[in-house]
Image: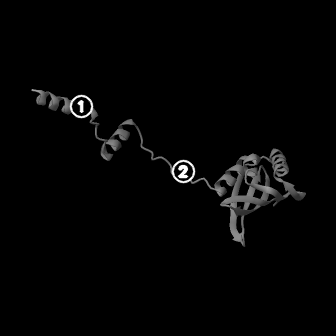
Amino acid sequence: MKKLLLVVFVLSGLGALAQPSPPSALEEQEKFQKVGEYTPAPIKEAVTFKTTIVAAFKDGDAETIAKFFAENIDLKILDKENLYSKSQSEHILKDFFENHKPTDFEIVHEGKSGQTDYLIGDLSSGKEKFRVKINTKTTNKVQYITSLSITAS
């Protein structure tokens, strides 16, 4: 009798642990057809230096761009050109974006020259167009902007 109770107890315990099987692909498809149109989730683009910089220029986000600045930057923005500290460069770039609100930014060329990587892009601000040149150097697997130029095109 004790063995019978033990078997019943064990079997009821296993039943409590059992989980329903996952729905088949066909059942999932039928579910979406009943609810509405099925739209697969978009594949997210990997967050890279380039994608971050493009988004920051489109948004006029000087703070995000400045996170990639080296300690000193060769900065040329319109008629202002000099070697500036990271914080000075951020303020100058922020002023530029306040006066020229970006509407679009697109990379038109990229490459490598020696130890320097570079990006060249077109920045739109209303009816104005600017050419952006960014030089970077990678140190300890971190990419830093060493030179930034924004000129009227």
> Residue 79, image x and y in percent?
90, 57
Which residue is tagged 2?
44
Quadrant the C terminus occupies: bottom right
Q: Residue 58, image x and y in percent?
A: 71, 50
10 Å crowding of disc 1: few (<14), some (14-19), many (20+): few
Closest to the observer, 127 or 72: 72
Residue 57 in the image: state x and y as whole percent: 72, 51
Q: Position of residue 23 (x, y in %)?
A: 31, 42
> At numbered mark 2, what does the secondary structure look like: helix, strand or loop?
loop
Front-most of residues 103 and 49: 49
Q: Earlier in the sequence, mark 2 or mark 1?
A: 1
In front: label 2 or label 1: 1
Which residue does the image show at 65% across and 61% down from the upper left? Answer: 141
Task: Left or right? Give the position of 43 relative to 21.
Answer: right
Please tell me which residue lies in front, 102 or 128: 102
Give the label on residue 13, or none. Answer: 1
